[in-house]
Amino acid sequence: MAGPMSAEPLDRSIDRRAFLARTAALAAVSAVGASVTLPGIAQAAPPVTGPGTKVTWNPALDVPNAFVKPRPEAVADPTELTIAEAAWLIRNGKLTPQKLVEAYLARIDAYEGTYKAFNLVLAEAAVKAARQAANRPNRGALHGIPLAVKDNYWTEGVRTTANSYLFADFVPPYDATSVAKLTVSGAIVLGKTQMGPLATTRATTPDGVVTTVNAWTPGNPATNPGGSSTGSATAVAGRLATGGTGTQTGGSITAPANAQNLTGLKPTMGRVSLAGIIPLSYTRDHPGPLARDAKDAAIMLTAMAGEDAADPRTQGLPALPNLINAATPKRTGDRVVMRWKTRIGVLPGFTSGTSATAQARRAYLDTLAGIEGATLVEVPLPEGWDQLNGTMLNNVRLPERSEPFMPYLRQDLRGFGVSVTGWLQGALLGANEFVTGQRIKLLLMERVLDQLFDSCDVVVQTGPVPFDILGLPEIAFPIGFDGNGVPIGTILGGLPYGEDRLLSVAAAYQALTDWHWRRPADPAPAAAARSAAPGGALRLTAEEVAELSQ
């Protein structure tokens, strides 16, 4: 599309004081209960969802930019297609949902024994849903698209374990709100994916035996695949599903996305309902998509986002912007340009060193600098950055983790398996430290909004902290590979409700690079993996889980 830059996206119009006040109220809610009404930031429509309430699909999924004509090399293998490409083929009658589902089930049959991405594969139900989709009106880009769902999302009538002893036999009576939003939009649940026990670390059994491998190094389970949304990431990277859902409390979407060459989008706190998701931290849990590119992440978040009567964190927020358009690369003639003029903040030391990661970061910034409308600016860290990001801030999550699980802690500690240490730490943390941590969080939020974002619109990051702690949006995407063929990723952080700005930058970068198109080689057949002796399995100890837990 030619023409001048579009008007500023939503993120610059948000009252930063209002977001800070809402964050303070959210901290109070975490201590006194979820019945407290949070202050609104914008006028919004009445809540439309909740347990037992009919969920409606989002018409924004049925827009021209949500459908992309497939690359010629992807047409021969449906599992290579992005969501947007598969949607184009389905809309145009060139691919049926059933053929797409069956293609993924064939790969699952061949390679799941190696990847171990799933807790449960719903083959029969997925094929049935695909057949039904063929006889229903097309509702947009998710119609007939098979997705992998992290096993802490409730799924009606389907076991939801959070990979733990505590919920080993739990069968939810209804879907999590975000699952209901995906399926009402036509998506098909292909299966439930492996995860860190109770969403703490990389995927293991409840007693610490590593399950899921990185799809790029399936023969080496020691290569970190990212956690705790490990199974969803491996399923998408290994072409066992078109997209997947994750949750992030301390890096559980961005880390597996970076580790496995995916695009992961952690939205602003409240953008997606947490109703029907087994909790980890009331003020830090974020549901979001793990996808193959920015456009697919935008499609999934468009479906998942919105108000929910069952989750006060979702209410009174600004309207969701047009994420799919934001994730559509903009061009002037044959040149890619930024959809909006964007100042990209670069933190001190981001490209320091001679490692493969440092080299990839320099090339990444060079690419961004060459896009019309992008300006790289050096930004200093806010005052007291290291002190404010210390242990006391991070420890706020511990009592939030323990509080809903206190009946289980009193009954039998063995139910927590190898992750028990974190819950005990939370139960024993003093009120003094908890309150101090909340005050630190508010001070850090104020300095990030007023100092860090004073001269930039988005900022490069070396890790998810502290943006996930503060509830700010982040997007992770690939920028290269190291000498061993393991993906290298990066993270961009944005202002509150600025998911559209983040998607626009990632989309522009991906229009000029091909990292996100690269796929890992197929692993050894599942039969070989099943015959491997279990005695050599990698196991995490309780101490290691406590150290690695988000």
Image (tube, rainbow, N blue to C red):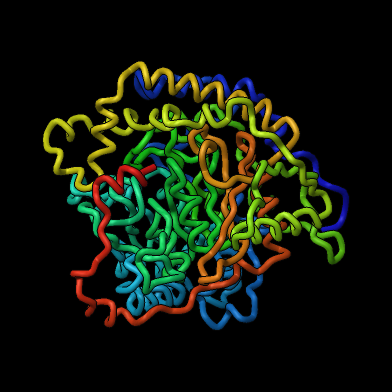
What is the quadrant of the C terminus in the image?
Answer: top left
Q: In this view, does 113 lie above or below 328?
A: below
Whether residue 255 is visible here, answered yes or no, is yes
Residue closest to the eye, 355 or 472:
355
Residue located 52% across and 59% down the image: 291
Residue closest to the eye, 152 or 549:
549
Choose top left, top right, bottom left or bottom right for residue 130.
bottom left
Whether residue 140 is visible here, answered yes or no, is no
172 displayed left or right of 283: left
Q: In this view, does 238 lie above or below 528?
A: above
Q: Is residue 480 above or below residue 95?
A: above
**Extreme-front residue of the structure:** 353
**Extreme-left residue of the structure:** 411
112 displayed left or right of 284: left
Q: Where is residue 6 in the image (x, y as percent from the top left)?
A: 81, 45
267 displayed left or right of 536: right
What is the quadrant of the N terminus in the image?
Answer: bottom right
Q: Position of residue 381 (x, y in %)?
A: 65, 33
Residue closest to the eye, 97 or 439:
439
Q: Is residue 497 above or below residue 102?
A: above
Choose top left, top right, bottom left or bottom right for residue 329.
bottom right
Residue located 61% across and 81% down the image: 73
Q: Where is residue 223 in the image (x, y as percent from the top left)?
A: 41, 64
Residue located 37% across and 70% down the image: 220
Residue located 47% across and 63% down the image: 136
Residue closest to the eye, 171 or 18:
18
Q: Position of residue 90 (x, y in %)?
A: 55, 70
